[in-house]
Image (cartoon, helix red, strand yellow):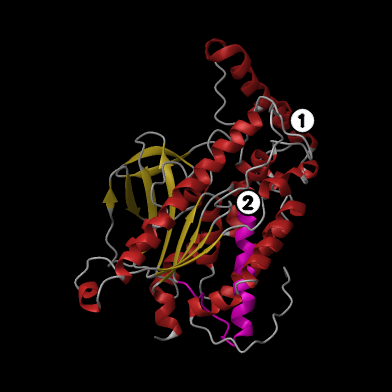
Amino acid sequence: MTHASRADTTALVLTGGGARAAYQVGVLQAIAALRAACGQAHGPAPFSILIGTSAGAINAAALASGADHFDHAVRRIARAWSQVHAQQVYHADSLRVLQRGAHWLTLLSLGWALARWRRVHPHSLLNNAPLAQLLKTLVPLERVPHLIRAGHLRALAVTASSYNSGLHVAFFDAGDAQAPWAHTLRKSARGPITHAHLLASSAIPLVFPATALPIDGHTEYFGDGSMRQTSPLAPAIHLGAQRLLVVGTSRSQEPTPMLPPGTQQPYPSLATVAGHALSNIFLDALAVDITHVQQINHALSLMTAEQQSHSPIHPLELLVFMPSRSLDDEAARHVGDLPRSMRVLLSTLGVQANGPGGGALASYLLFESGYTRQLMALGRSDALARREEICAFFGWHDSGNPIRRICFS
């Protein structure tokens, strides 16, 4: 099988997690560096099916927009993530943060009845209007249909969850031969991917506002694609993938802290509860889906070649990357990097710099370069440690050449 035909059935699946998606960029940097070390010519991406959810949708769309020059696209994304500041993603000035925060605290302390009486209906904790402007320069989506027609890209899909219908929708752009699909509580919708789709997919529940999207001749409001996502790998499979490179942003298992007998734990803060809830949204379905694929692969391996030829399913080659260290702990060390207004707002929820319990929530909102660069470095390290697996997955011959220095320019 040639590298081109292998790439045609290889999918990159990027999951969500707000600022945690910087980890994915480090993995992509390592893949680009390994490809160069293996003597592969610069050019199109080594995968032609790109699937993104939440912040992973932004990374996937940015890659798709540069699918004809993978190395250049990775450098552009890495440069953006390495220089990011919270003000580029959401309004972080004192007045607007405190206004929205005060509205939310009013709802929490005095109840929805008072909010209704005062006609106070904040749509979200934060306003992500700056992100809409950033996407216009970072993600030139107008290139995607042309790249699909030219054969550089087979498909791009981003997922979002409808607050109106409750359906989980995979919005996709692909060749005319690709048929839509539908299952219980999830479906697909064909059409050009827009920046509004990226805003919807990355709208962390309660934190960022929902986005209106047209679907089936009407408009619905959509939020983060990780919500109600029962099968994160399904869009890639429907779009023809036989090999899946999956990059998550949460560890599949966190170590259980050992506490002395009789230790009384403090009541969890709002930040702890919110961080726990978000971690479940962004992790559980992916872990279950990966296990499901592995079980199917094992069952197929027990069949004879003839039995497999008559089976309606086929084995999927799977390569999965998850952070080797806790991103919550890293976030707790960088809370102080946030603008003062955000630190004040998060402190009311129980987030303190280097404090216990609040790192999980902060890890999704820490769009600051000190934190994102650390996550990118971790992604590079985790990927380069699995050099042999990556080369085997893409079919590259590794002659042991040293990895060139990875930079952001």
- Residue 13 visible? The answer is yes
Residue 303 in the figure: left or right of residue 280:
left
Query: Residue 338 in the image: x percent, y percent?
Result: 76, 42
Query: Residue 63 in the image: x percent, y percent?
Result: 54, 65
**264 and 95: which is toward the camera:** 264
Chief secondary structure of the magenta portion: helix
Q: Quadrant of the N terminus?
A: bottom left
Asked if marks 1 and 2 touch (Cβ < 8 Å), the reply is no
Q: Which numbered circle lies on residue 46?
A: none
Which of the 4 image quarters holds residue 86?
top right
Q: Secondary structure at mark 1?
A: helix
Number of residues whose C-alpha sits closer than 10 Å to that of mark 2, classed few (under 14), some (14–19) or many (20 or more): many
Magenta-highlighted residues: 21-47
Q: Secondary structure at mark 2?
A: helix
Rendered position, 88 above or below 342: below
What residue is pinned by disc 1? 344
Amino acid carrying mark 1 in the image: Val
Residue 155 in the figure: left or right of residue 399:
left
Q: Quadrant of the C terminus?
A: bottom right
Number of residues whose C-alpha sits closer than 10 Å to that of mark 1, classed few (under 14), some (14–19) or many (20 or more): some
Query: Residue 287 in the image: x percent, y percent?
Result: 47, 52
Rendered position, 160 above or below 379: above
